[in-house]
Amino acid sequence: MTACLFCSIAAGEVSASFVHQDELVIAFRDINPQAPTHILVVPREHIVSAAELSAVQDPVWARLLHVSQQLAAAEGIVESGYRIVTNVGRDAGQSVSHLHLHLLGGRAMSWPPG
Ligand code: DGP
């Protein structure tokens, strides 16, 4: 078992409700959903946060966004709208130290976020 929760999910050591898997990226439903659609889009590679990305990881970042776009379409939330969020560090409330995008939709959301 790896020490990182999302690495363990990517390795199949911890179960999750997967909605997408490819060689670079996995996506699964958040265990504590904050909207009718709440999916986490996660690189297989252990990257702590968006603050740790380097240019060699541009393909990973691009895939995260493209998969999020495809999942939004699959969830039927393109017309109503959706939010893609990544928390970085303590003040943003990042609780899992493995880069992930939150794909949220299916309800109206307020701005600015809390
Ligand atoms: P963040 O706070 O931005 O680091 O988001 C971490 C998210 O991970 C949070 O919305 C809850 C979710 N989460 C934590 N543990 C698990 C788990 O074991 N399974 C799933 N599916 N989601 C988890």
Image: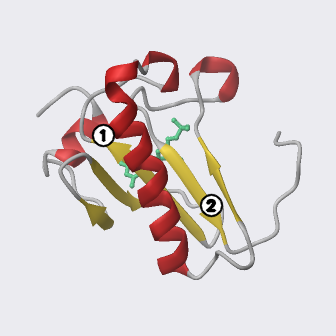
> Which residue is rendered at x = 51% and y = 31% of the image?
95
Residue 30 is at least partly visible in this image: no
- Quadrant in the picture for residue 91: top right
Q: Quadrant of the C terminus?
A: top right
Tell me: 33 left or right of 41. Answer: right
Asked if residue 15 is positioned above or below residue 19 in the image, the reply reads above
- Determine which residue is flagged by label 2: 104
Q: Secondary structure at mark 1?
A: helix
Residue 11: quadrant of the picture: top left
Coordinates of residue 35 in the picture (x, y in percent)? 65, 66
Please identify, in this view, whether the residue under mark 1 or under mark 2 is nearer the observer.
2
Q: Which mark is residue 58?
A: none
| Residue reaching furthest to the right | 111
Q: Specify few, some or many for label 1: CA neighbours under 10 Å numbering under 14, 14-19, or 20 or more.
A: many
Name the residue carrying label 1: 6
In this view, the residue in front, 82 or 17, is 82
Label 1 C-beta lies within 8 Å of the nearest ligand 1 atom? yes
Q: Earlier in the sequence, mark 1 or mark 2?
A: 1
Q: Where in the figure is residue 67, as x and y percent of width and height? A: 41, 59
Give the percent coordinates (x, y) of residue 74: 47, 79
User: Residue 41: percent from the left, percent from the top?
Assistant: 42, 51
The answer to which of 24 and 3 lies nearer the viewer is 24
Which three-letter amino acid code belongs to the residue tagged 1? Phe
Q: Amino acid at mark 2?
A: Leu
